[in-house]
Image: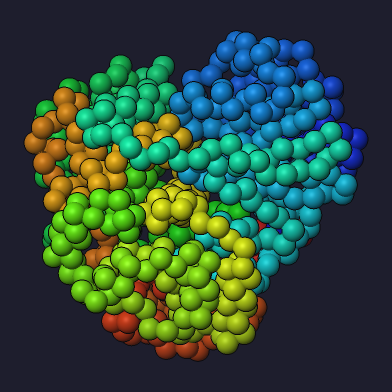
Amino acid sequence: MVDFPEPGERPGWFVVLPDCASAARAGALLRNRGVQEVSHPSGRPWLLGGWSPGAMTVGEAGQVKIAVLGEHAMTADRLTTAADRIRTIADLDELTRTMAGSSHLVASVTGRVRVQGSVSGLRRVFYARIGDANVAADRADVLAALLDAEVDEQRLAARLLNPGAPHPLAGVPVWRGVGALESGHYLALDADGRGRPVAWWTPPAPTVPMAEGASAFRAALSAAVEVRVRGRDVVSCDLGGLDSTSVCALAASGRAKVVAYTADGLDPLCDDVPWARRTVAQLDDVEHHIVAGDRLPMVYEGLQDVDDRFDEPCPAAMHPSRCLLIPRLAAARGSQLHLTGFGGDELLAGSPAHLHTLMRTHPRTAWQRVRGFAAQSPWRYRETLRQLWDDSAYRQWLGRVGDQLTAVPPPFETPALDWGTPPRLPPWTTPDAVDAVRELIRTAARTTEPLAQRRGLHVELEAMGTNSRMVRQVGQMTARAGLTLAAPYYDDRVIEAGLAVRPQERITPWQYKPLIVEAMRGIVPAESLTRHTKDEGSYEAEVGMREQRAELLALCEDSRLARLGLIDANTLRETASRPLPPTLPFDALYQTVVCEMWLRTLDTAATAAVPG
């Protein structure tokens, strides 16, 4: 059972009620918590929760009311003008397609309600039936508290998969009775309290040439940064790889004082600091701070101190102190908003799986790209050909995934031209948990459609969803430190501008992230645009496991996952007590630690909620 977040607790949250009498039960449960409230035009309760001043902008005209929550440029006057033109919830499509930034949009239109998040999944929408009405929220645990719901052990078992649960299981809430919208959908609530998902967004056709696409991407990313920095005196930024460098340079072109932070990793091959210094030397008035590698907490350090309550297992829980070091420094410096490069990899590096489609439309170009990628990896020749010629539907691929959950993971040099990397369960998973996950996957394989018909686009959209959920949770952590975490690459308009570029020009083995390089000419210093390296963090993961082994082994004692019958704690203890074998990636251990820590924070919250 989950404890209910307090209304004033950061980060904020909200619940959306339909405009009907059957929503009274949910409204009463929330009002008993002393929440904030915004009413429907009818006077019934509409938005309830706890949010900070200025977080919500509302406009109203007649029987139409529109609320926007997040990072955006909408004013009450603009929303009122828009509301005056709206007749049905479908009419809001035009407004949502023009909004820069990242936000939730909620509208009440003559008794009907529209609840919409973002395409990437950074702004999520959850739903549940409370009494006789469907309600929505931006946090799954809020709905779980209203339902007095328990953890769904089968769904939780799927979170042990490495590198992660496949679509559609990845984003399914781990609470019984709670659902979540898929990307590109909004929730429509009718006047009787019934709810249904409605598709409103599809990816753009990838037909735009690089020159035209780079200009459009530059405009979209510039607008995304401007939405965040406008009217602020001080903003902070990560300054590491090319993605965060571009965001930092855009912020520095505005009026706000920019304070940039670069973490100096312990890996001798990490070159973020020298590149950051070159960038700052050519930007105007950027205050630059370098965080020494020995100041950064190690991966797995501080596990026993984790007390953040997330609505799902959070990868950042593996190294909370590490995640929060720079945001805390930025907040102490006076920043209330911190810009990051999260999301750039999925969009700008992209997926070579686009070659599967390209082979059928532009075979000569595809063969050139295949040879380039194969030389770099190197890909295995026979497996490369198999994936290129294989035309299996996503359902068939997903069915095979269910059959191979305990097989040896694919070798590192396996090409990435399929619907995804087949996930595996770690060796400490119990047979019952394996059967439970296999059942989930096989059931999904009967009806699931991919996120896109083109493999490359499916892989990119799935990666955006998976990684943006982690960033969403990191944002919840930084909110407690008084800082808003902004990830412009996950904005709808930025994603659209990036995906519209021809994949054979956006993704190439011969140039590192060519779209951002072309888009940022004249903004990012020319020398910085020549960078083609990236710190990938495996060194810290290996050292962290070695130095924090005692904390890892402590998780095996009275393991909550073992209590649920999902893992064998003895097998986990034996594996964690020595270096991981070559066939077991570090991420396999990550997933288990994440789930274990999440269950323990639930126990802590429940204990704290019991009167003494």
Depth check: 482 or 2 in front? Answer: 2
Query: Which residue occupies 76% across, 43% down?
Result: 195
Vertical arrangement, residue 273 with respect to residue 521, above or below: below
Vertical arrangement, residue 176 with respect to residue 333, above or below: below
Q: Residue 441: percent from the left, percent from the top?
A: 57, 71
Location of residue 23 by image quarter: top right
Q: Residue 194: percent from the left, percent from the top?
A: 81, 43
Depth check: 123 or 423 in front? Answer: 423
Taking the view exactly as shown, the residue that stands out farthest to the right is 21
On-image quarter of the N terminus? bottom right
Vertical arrangement, residue 199 with respect to residue 171, above or below: above
Query: Which residue occupies 72% across, 12% down?
Result: 61
From the viewer's perspective, is 139 left or right of 345? right
Query: Which residue occupies 72% across, 44% down?
Result: 196
What count of labels does the image hold? 0
On-image quarter of the C terminus? bottom right
From the viewer's perspective, is 141 left or right of 211? right
Depth check: 534 or 218 in front? Answer: 218
Residue 551 shows in the view: no
Depth check: 432 or 2 in front? Answer: 432
Query: Which residue occupies 68% across, 60% down?
Result: 175
From the viewer's perspective, is 274 left or right of 28? left
